[in-house]
Image (tube, helix red, strand yellow):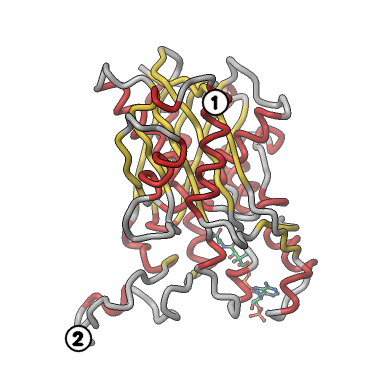
């Protein structure tokens, strides 16, 4: 069994931040950001809460799917930057989209979130015949957690939302999800001020670096090493499950973190860069949103068409990674 993506939608905030805009807060320049990351501009949420962006994207996906919101049986939202610890973004989006008959929950697998959530949707559809449609909604406001004094991380990220409505189908589908929690300290942000102090003699202390409360900390070099390894590995593990080769894939849609990560991974895989869809130049790294945002853009402009074989590949904090191979 597999899934069919019936509808896609996205929403990005109105506010754009160019590379030059960052020179107002940190010692950086357009040339460094372009050549080291491939990013030219990104969107930053202003007045829009995460749930609002998620709802707008979800409404568009539902409309494109041509279904009624009441027919949705499950809303899965993926986010690492929820507006609330509770309720979930999924419950809010369920209400705002009118998906009154749906169950709803969030998952946090950071930048791999959409791959994880879509795979959970497939597993729900496979095991519950009464479920017809699942709404998978990715929503992120990274800008609210960025440390705008850290030039090596704040320039990388952007905000937005993207969603997909899926149903069960017999089309090609294979997935592999994975995590290496030993790298958890390489990309993290503290959640609660009330978290108890860890005793200094605890083993745990070394695992997580000192970081300003609630601000994103990243060890760029370690994450870079992990990502260039995880991207080809995720594809290979999913491909092995359905016996497909890289040459049979029409489009690779990787998490949009850094153009150099994608180029290095493409070389390792032995697949041409022309098959990798890139949107990070205009959106930056939008975490779990980047894959459905890219998918939606390329389907809307006619690059991705029905019947093509896609490889969706996520990697990010956790350190999580995973791949899905499916027919569009
Ligand atoms: O979803 C996953 C999210 N995370 C990622 O994708 C991050 C993966 N890592 C990366 O993409 C790269 O490691 C970075 C883009 C973060 C950094 O690129 P790099 O080529 O690894 O640079 P670096 O850390 O080796 O730094 C080189 C120099 C340093 O200066 P010195 O020590 O050589 O004087 C940095 O301080 O570049 C400096 N630098 C900057 N200069 C201008 C770091 N950030 C900036 C900046 N503008 N924004």
Q: Classify residue 202 as left or right of residue 180.
A: left
**CB-based contact (under 8 Å), mark 1 and mark 2:** no
Horizontal and vertical percent position of residue 243:
43, 21
Above or below residue 91? Residue 180 is: below
Name of the residue lying farthest toward the top: 170
Query: Dot 2, crowdedness within 10 Å: few (<14), some or many (≥20)?
Result: few
- C-alpha distance separating marks 1 and 2: 52 Å
Q: Residue at x 62, y 49 (%)?
A: 264
Q: Seen in the image, is 38 located left or right of residue 91?
A: right
Q: Position of residue 109 (x, y in %)?
A: 38, 50
Residue bearing the label numbered 1: 7
Mark 2 residue element: loop
Q: Is mark 1 within 8 Å of ligand 1?
A: no
- The answer to which of 237 and 139 lies nearer the viewer is 139
Q: Which mark is residue 204?
A: none
x then y, percent, for residue 179:
34, 50
The disc at residue 201 is 2
Q: Position of residue 32 (x, y in %)?
A: 75, 68
Residue 215, compared with residue 327, is above or below; it is: below
Q: Quadrant of the N terminus?
A: top left
Labels 1 and 2: the sequence-earlier one? 1
Q: Secondary structure at mark 1?
A: strand
Decide if residue 267 is on the left or right side of residue 198.
right
| Residue at image coords 62%, 42% | 267
Where 185 sits versus 45, above or below?
below
């Amino acid at each position: 069994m597999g899934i069919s993506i019936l509808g896609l939608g996205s929403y990005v905030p109105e506010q754009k931040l160019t590379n030059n805009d960052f020179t107002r807060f940190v010692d950086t320049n357009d040339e460094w950001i372009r050549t080291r990351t491939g990013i030219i501009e990104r969107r930053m949420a202003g007045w829009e809460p995460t749930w609002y962006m998620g709802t707008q994207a979800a409404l568009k996906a539902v409309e494109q799917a041509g279904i009624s919101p009441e027919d949705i049986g499950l809303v899965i939202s993926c986010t690492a930057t929820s507006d609330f610890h509770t309720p979930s973004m999924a419950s809010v989006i369920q209400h705002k989209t009118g998906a009154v008959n749906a169950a709803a929950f969030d998952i946090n697998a950071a930048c791999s979130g959409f791959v994880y959530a879509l795979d959970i949707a497939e597993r729900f559809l496979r095991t519950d015949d009464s479920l017809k449609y699942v709404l998978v909604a990715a929503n992120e406001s990274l800008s609210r957690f960025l440390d705008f004094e850290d030039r090596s991380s704040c320039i990388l990220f952007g905000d937005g939302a993207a969603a997909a409505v899926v149903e069960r189908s017999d089309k090609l589908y294979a997935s592999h999800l994975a995590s290496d929690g030993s790298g958890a300290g390489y990309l993290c942000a503290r959640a609660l001020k009330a978290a108890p102090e860890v005793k200094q003699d605890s083993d745990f202390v070394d695992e997580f670096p000192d970081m300003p409360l609630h601000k994103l900390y990243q060890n760029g070099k370690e994450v870079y090493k992990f990502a260039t390894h995880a991207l080809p590995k995720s594809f290979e593990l999913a491909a092995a499950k359905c016996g497909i080769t890289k040459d049979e894939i029409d489009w690779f849609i990787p998490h949009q973190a850094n153009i150099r990560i994608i180029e290095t991974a493409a070389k390792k895989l032995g697949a041409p860069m022309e098959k990798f869809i890139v949107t990070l130049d205009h959106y930056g790294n939008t975490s779990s949103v980047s894959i459905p945002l890219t998918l939606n853009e390329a389907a809307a402009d006619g690059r991705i068409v029905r019947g093509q074989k896609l490889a969706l590949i996520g990697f990010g904090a956790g350190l999580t990674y995973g791949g899905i191979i499916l027919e569009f």
